[in-house]
Image: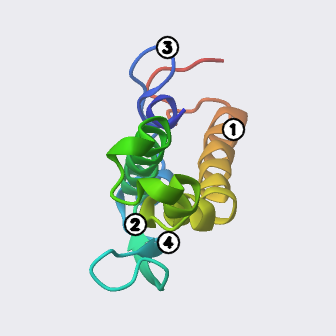
Amino acid sequence: MHQGLYLGFSGLRALNMPELHALWHEPSVNTTLFVDAVNASIPSTGLFSLFNLGKQFAAAARDVQYAASHPNVSAQADNSRQSLRATRQWQFIQANAASVLYPAYVRSLNYMVRAVCMGCTAQLCVCVC
């Protein structure tokens, strides 16, 4: 979904909307972060562009999936379910999926729908009307 929203689902498309460009390229989405160097359970915040937030989310999901399917690789294999929940990746997903990433994607989709509803007047580089 992330790649489709950014690049287009059936071919490369770009919207010429400053709001949409800012959402995807400017660090404006307030995100909760967890850093291993400190304490993975202590959150901090940072600003991400939607593009970078989506990349971070996908990477965290891949890490969680790998750790869940390879519990013996984990340094804390004795209680892998609990140790998985303690990782910064799991906490990042829990903190940002529903309350940060989802609303940002909805906002992006709303901009796209608004562009189409405006009659495709040079807003879509490839009009789908």
> What's the CA distance linking mark 1 and mark 3?
16 Å
* Residue ID for mark 2: 48
What residue is at 32 percent from the left and 74 percent from the top? Answer: 36
Closer to us: 10 or 92: 92
Seen from the viewer's position, the closer of residues 29 and 84 is 84
Task: Name the secondary structure under disc 2.
Answer: strand
Sequence-wise, which precedes: disc 1 or disc 3? 3
Residue at position x 57%, y 33% from top?
121
- Is residue 48 positioned above or below 51 on the image? below
- Residue at left offset 51%, top offset 35%: 5
Q: Nearer the viewer, mark 3 or mark 4?
A: 4
The single residue placed furthest to the left in the displayed view is: 37
Q: Amino acid at mark 3?
A: Ser
Q: What secondary structure is marked by label 4?
A: strand
Pinpoint residue 78: horizontal percent, then vertical percent.
Answer: 47, 57
Label ID, residue 31: 4
